[in-house]
Image (tube, rainbow, N blue to C red):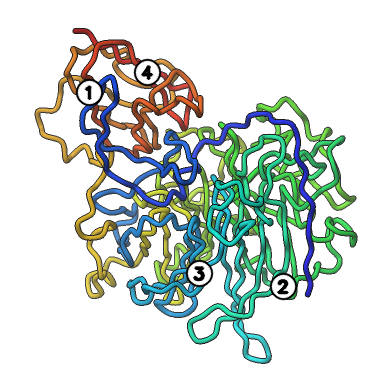
Amino acid sequence: MSFVFFKSFQFLFSFSFVFFLLILFSSSLSSITINHANNLFKTINFIYSSPTYQAFAQYAVAPSSPTGPTVVDPTLKAQVVTPATNKGSTSMAFIGPNDILVLEKNSGKVKRIVNGSVLSKPVLDLPVANKIERGLLGIAVAPNVTQDGKKYVFLFFTQAGGITDGDEFSQKPPAKGNMIYRYEWVSGKLINPKPLLQLPANPGATGRPDHNGGKLAIGPDGNVYAVIGEVGGHQTQAANLENGSPPDGTGGVIRVTPDGLPVPNGPFGDKPPLNYYFGYGIRNSFGLGFDPVSGKLWDTENGPDYGDEINLVEPGFNSGWELIQGFAKNSQLNHTTSELVKLSKSAKYSDPKFEWVDPVGPTALVFLNSDKLGAQYKNDMFVGDVNNGNLYHFKLSADRTKLLAPDGTSIPKKPIISDQLSAYRFGSGFGGITDLKVGPDGFLYILANNGAIFRIVPSIFASSNPAFYASPYPPGYVLQQNSKQLSQLPSNTTANKVIIVGVKGLKSYDPNPIKIKMGDIITWVNADVISHTVTSGKDYDRNISGKLFNSGGMITNNVYQLKFAVPGTFDYFCLFHPDMKGQVIVSK
C-alpha cells in the first residue's frame, strides 16, 4: 500500500481572523424564536450554526435569493436542478448524465442525485472530523476508465480519530489526518478504498482546525492534484518562514499519481515530502481547475481581511503567504518578494492574476469547455464566491496566461474595488457557492452550500425543458427573516430604515447612529453590490460578537429587521468588513 504520512507540528497560539467559512458548511439553516433574559428582541429569525459543531454564529454566507438566481445575459437562464437540502454541501462531481455525487461536510456522506432527486441511501458514509473547516471536502472523478475497466473516484476528507463524525468534540482521539483516498465506482457504490496520502489535520500556531482546503482536480497528465491551506497556521518553510520547520504537506498544491506515488521530476526535487509539492505559499483555497486549452492549473485563494486571489499555478509556484498576500506591491504584510523562501531553484513567486479589495470568499473555479451557452463563452473561466453568492466571468488572453474582463479588455494590475465588480459578475443570488462543474450536457452547474444545485442554460432550452423545481427551497421551507428582498417589504416601510451603502467606515450604515424609541423596528437594507452583515459588537470577538443579534450574510437588496424592546446603546459591525461600524441608540 502506497501511503505517505506528513507529521504535523503544534505551535503557540496566535489569533488569525477567518471571515467567512464557519456557516459555509453548517449542517442546517433554521428559523427559530429566541427570548433573551433582557427581552431585547422578540421572535427574531436569523441564520445560526448548530452548537454541535462549535461554530460561531457570527460567521455567515450569502443565502440563496428567495426568487432564485439571475444571470446577466438575457439569453441565458438559471434553473433549479435540486432544491436545498441544508446538509452543508462542499463539492460535487458527475458520475454520468444527470447523475451527480454530492459531498456533505459534517456527515461524511456521499449522496447521489439522479434526475434531480436525492437518493435516500448514501453511496458512502465516512467518519469525519468536522470542527470548523474539517470534513468531507473534495471529490474528483477520473475522466476515463482504466485498461481493466475500473472507474476511479478520489475523495479528500478529514478522517476522524475514532469511528464517529465529530468525535473530536467528545475528547476522543484527534483527527487522523486530511486524507486522499481512491475508490472504485461499481454498481452505484464506492468500494475498494485505497489511501493515497495522509496530510496534517491538527492545527499549528492558531490552534484552530481551519484552512484545510480540500479541493481535488485531475490533471491532463492523469495525476491527482489537491490544494491544502496552512491548517491552523503551520509555521513551515512552505509558508515562507525561513526559520520555520521543514515543509510538512500543508500550505500548497499537492500532486500524486492515481496509485499514491510521487510524480517523477517534480519542481522541488525527489525527496519527500517536497516531491509531492507542485506549489506552495498558499494560505487557503477552495478552487482548482485546469484550462482545457493550455492544460495549465489555476486556483482561487482566500486572504485574511483583504487579498482574495485568482492565480495561475505553474510548476514551482510560490503564492507568497505568509509574507505576501495579494499583489506584492500592495501587500499589507510589510514584506517583499526578496524575503520569500525558495524551496528549490524552480521555485518562483507570481502575483495573482486578479485580486479583490474586499473579501468575497472565492471558492470554485471552472473552465466552460463547451459552446452550449454560446460560442462567446467557450473555454472562459467562471469563479464562484461564498460571501455574496456571485458568479464571476473572465476571458483569457491569447496565450492563456492573463485574465481579461468579460468584454475582452485588460484588467488593471491592482486590486479591484467592490464598486467595479459588476463588470465581472455573470450571475447572482445562488447563495454561498461551493462548487462549479460543466455537466455532460455542456451546461454550467452550480452547487450552493445549502445543497441546492442550479444549472445555467439557454433561455430557449429552458422554455421547452422546464426545471423540476421552481424554487431553490424545498416545499414548506420557511425563509429566514434576512432573506427577504426589498421588493417584499410593505410599501410604507420607510421609518427607521438604515441603508448599507458600502465599505465606508463610520459612514457605511446610513444613518449612523440611528436613534429610535423603545419598541421600534429597524429595517436594514443592503444597497451595496456585495454582501454585508449586521452583527452586534464593536469589533470581532468570537466569544461575544453576534450574541445579541446577527443578520447573517445579506446579499444585494436583502433586508434585516429587529425590534428593540429595551433602552440602551447597541454597537454593530460587518463581519466581512469589520471597519464598517454602526450604532443604535434606543430611548424610552
- Residue 93's disc is 3
Q: Name the residue carrying label 4.
A: 582
The percent position of residue 66, horizontal first and vertical second, equals: 25, 49
Please report whichever mark, 3 or 1, sits nearer to the chain's N-terminal start. Answer: 3
**Distance from label 3 to label 1 (Cα)?**
43 Å
Label 1, secondary structure: give it.
Answer: strand
Please report whichever mark, 3 or 4, sits nearer to the chain's N-terminal start. Answer: 3
**Amino acid of disc 1:** Ile
The percent position of residue 450, horizontal first and vertical second, equals: 38, 54
Question: How would you rate the neighbour count of disc 2 (Cα within 10 Å): few for under 14, some for 14-19, many for 20 or more?
Answer: few
Q: Name the residue carrying label 1.
A: 522
The answer to whether residue 437 is left or right of residue 67 is right
**Distance from label 2 to label 1 (Cα)?**
57 Å
**Distance from label 2 to label 4 (Cα)?**
52 Å
The vertical placement of 15 against 246, above or below, is above
- Residue 221's disc is 2
Label 4, secondary structure: give it.
Answer: strand
Question: How would you rate the neighbour count of disc 3 (Cα within 10 Å): few for under 14, some for 14-19, many for 20 or more?
Answer: many
Residue 321: quarter of image: top right
**Distance from label 3 to label 4 (Cα)?**
42 Å
Which callout, 2 or 1, points to the residue nearer the camera? 1
